[in-house]
Amino acid sequence: MRFFDKKSAATDQPHNQAEEDRPIHQALAQNIEEVKRSFPAAPDLTIFQFDTAPHGTPGALVFLDGLSDKNSLNSHILRPLMYGTQEVQKDISLPTISGCRILTTWSDVENAILQGESLLFLDGQQEVTAYDTKGWPQRGIEDPQLESSLKGGHQGFVETGMQNISLIRRYIPNLNLRISEQKIGRRGKTNVWILYLEDIAHPEVLQELETRLSKVDVDAVINTGELAEFIEDNPFSPFPQFIMTERPDSAASQLLAGRFVVIVDRSPSVIIAPATFTSFLQSVDDYSTRWLVTSFIRLLRFIALFIALLLPATYIAFISYNYEVIPIQLFLSVAESRARVPFPPLIEALMMEIMIEMMREAGIRLPAPVGQTIGIVGGIVVGQAAVQAGIVSNIMVIVVASTAIASFIFPSYDMGTAVRLLRFPMMLMASLFGIVGIVIGCMTLVGHLVALESLGTPYGSPLAPLRLVDMKDTFVRLPLWTMFRRPTSTRPIQKIRMRRERPRGDQR
């Protein structure tokens, strides 16, 4: 998918080709002037000129301050070159540092400097040595913010892609773990890695994923959310079609199931593909807790899904159209609480739902202690004041509070936001057609879920198409030893992942 017209693309092509073919000068002074012309307004550009020992060959070390590790520069490059601890011949003998490569064109030189590498120019040579001395500011590995776990690991991904790969390798130290690398972006080259298990993952899904990534043509990719929007099957669907996770243990378990992990450099979350609707209702804690408890929690999540999606719409339908289904005692209580409310149920529900969403966003944007106070105190004060003023009824406050609590149960933040968004059209359908409108809305959603795909994989699996073998880990989770097959939705090459019989104890 391209975001540039053909005219601009045709204009850029000759310039890029000329940049690639432009050789490096032999004279050191010309090379230094060329570097300065390439970086005209770069105060962080450092050009350190010196004479190499023992022959006194003039040289220059070029790097961007802040992107390179100065300790490596001083210890492994400048000290050997300046004090003769390693002789520099005309074939550029390399100092003792790993990650060295030879550059011959100016486009490679410019890209290497921007990536944090240090470049060694020597007088009389048309080759430049690039040293991998990247040392930009990094944060430590911390507990994931959006995906807290009770029994799982407390290490989350960081903004450095290679560190994220190392975190996954710790969980899967296997030679079949393959890594495919691509670069995306015109103005800012972003490294993207696809991780998969070669003897498990299906090659057709890998080819489809690589094809979609290769067609992304933008200035730069900043985070995984942007990349997921570029490569998803249906960009107009409210449902997330890829799993976003900050947890290395979750990514490793998905790799073992036959899925693919896409790591984007400079982003603290990864993409897991393909995904199904039920996978967004599964948590990493589900597999570290006893299966009876996990099954109860799974059922609770599905119940919360219907509450968060349909409870306000059901309230509107019952009050506006189908009030005959309400028990007489409850009907009298509802009528008494709505006696002073001047608005119809739809307006009443919209006001409260929008207020709750505003409080939720305010709690996220504010600092954590203040956000929690605003959410709790603001909800109590606004709800109580609205009831006393006769703007909303007591029943409406209960409905909105129950809906808000149910929407927090989802393990996936993206799925929770999708359900919150779909709540509003369901409320509108209920206000127009009552229970019939809710049924029409639910049928529309089911049809959309059945037709939706993720990298060519049915989004509704294992419900549509029905795959009974995968139902062991859908609404409930059966014991782990019963799930000896990998999910059918991932189309794994090796379908068996464990022995069928569990080790027996004394109680046989």
Image: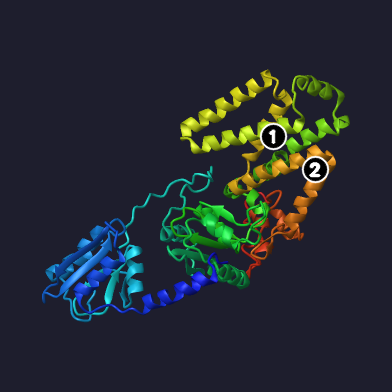
Residue, disc 2: 438
Report the front residue among 455 and 295. 455
Residue 280 located left or right of residue 10:
right
Q: Position of residue 419 (x, y in %)?
A: 67, 45
Toward the bottom, the furthest residue is 91
Q: Amino acid at mark 2?
A: Ile
Report the front residue among 179 and 112. 112
Q: How many marks?
A: 2
Residue, disc 1: 350
Q: Residue at the location (73% across, 26% down)?
A: 395
Query: Which one is earlier in the sequence, the residue at label 1 or at label 2?
Result: 1
Q: Residue at the location (43% across, 47% down)?
A: 142
Q: Amino acid at mark 1?
A: Leu
Residue 256 located left or right of residue 86:
right
Q: Position of residue 340 (x, y in %)?
A: 75, 19
Residue 477 can be seen in this image: yes
Residue 272 can be seen in this image: no
Task: Identify whether 223 is placed above or below 375.
Answer: below
Report the front residue among 409 and 15. 15
Q: Position of residue 336 (x, y in %)?
A: 79, 19
Task: Identify whether 377 is placed above or below 89.
Answer: above
Hey, which quadrant is residue 458 in on the image? bottom right
Task: Identify whether 14 is placed above or below 395.
Answer: below
In this view, the mark in front (1 or 2): 1
Q: Position of residue 149 (x, y in %)?
A: 53, 44
Label 2 Cα crowd, 10 Å radius (few <14 / some 14-19 / many 20+): many
